[in-house]
Image (cartoon, rainbow, N blue to C red):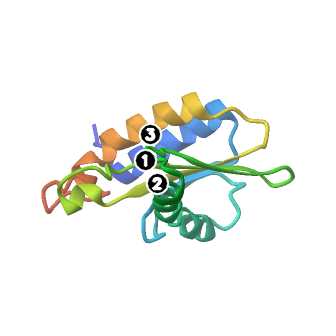
Amino acid sequence: MRRRGRQQQLEDELRATNIVGRYRGSIICTEQGLLVACDGDELGDEEALAGFASLFDEIVSRGARDLGLAGIDEVTVLDGSAGRLVIRPLGDPAAESSAARRRMFLVVAMDADASWRRNTNRLVTRLREILDPIIAGGAPDESLDS
């Protein structure tokens, strides 16, 4: 039996959650806004979404500095007609090594009235299991294809 690569595992997890939650689509991107994986036909411009998600750190930094919010684990943007975007970090910002601090983000696009917290919690847990060797600075040969 052929082992599925990380890329396929990520896309399978995104697809399964999109089906369960009836979401428009979802992406995983780096903190630089580079697209890692995606699923969904109704996402629009995936690269623009990835770039938008890269603003997460700025929002979290300002939330901590200006409002004293140190534990932000999600940013949600709602537009009544365009729907909702949920952005969740996949890395560990409190980790000591710079490799473990490298962040990736999950972005899920959905209708404005969709529920998401339970589904995205489960998805983040599964994605971290797949990505942990990469985010945590695994072996040099670790990649999305292995």
| Tally of numbered discs | 3
Mark 2 Cα-neighbour bin, 10 Å: few <14, some 14–19, many ≥20 = some
Is 10 on the left or on the right of 145, as rendered?
Answer: right
Calculate the distance from the C-alpha at mark 1 to the C-alpha at mark 3.
19 Å
Residue 36 visible? The answer is no
Q: Residue lying at the far left in this picture: please name it.
A: 139
Q: Are the residues tagged 2 and 1 within 8 Å (C-beta)?
A: yes
Amino acid bearing label 2: Ala
Which of 42 and 128 lies nearest the eye of the viewer? Answer: 128
Calculate the distance from the C-alpha at mark 2 to the C-alpha at mark 3.
22 Å
Residue 98 visible? The answer is yes
Mark earlier in primary sequence (2, 1): 2
Mark earlier in primary sequence (2, 3): 2
Residue depicted at 56% across the width and 28% down the height: 118
Is 10 on the left or on the right of 62, as rendered?
Answer: left
Kindly identify which residue carries mark 3.
124
Calculate the distance from the C-alpha at mark 2 to the C-alpha at mark 1.
5 Å
In the image, residue 74 sits, relative to residue 66, either above or below, namely: above
Percent position (x, y) of residue 81?
A: 87, 53
Is 92 on the left or on the right of 59, as rendered?
Answer: left
Mark 1 Cα-neighbour bin, 10 Å: few <14, some 14–19, many ≥20 = few
Percent position (x, y) of residue 91?
A: 34, 51
Kindly identify which residue carries mark 1.
70
Nearer to us of marks 2 and 3 is 2
Amino acid bearing label 1: Ala
Which of the labelled discs sits on residue 64, or is there none? 2
Residue depicted at 39% across the width and 36% down the height: 126
Percent position (x, y) of residue 127?
A: 39, 42
Amino acid bearing label 3: Val
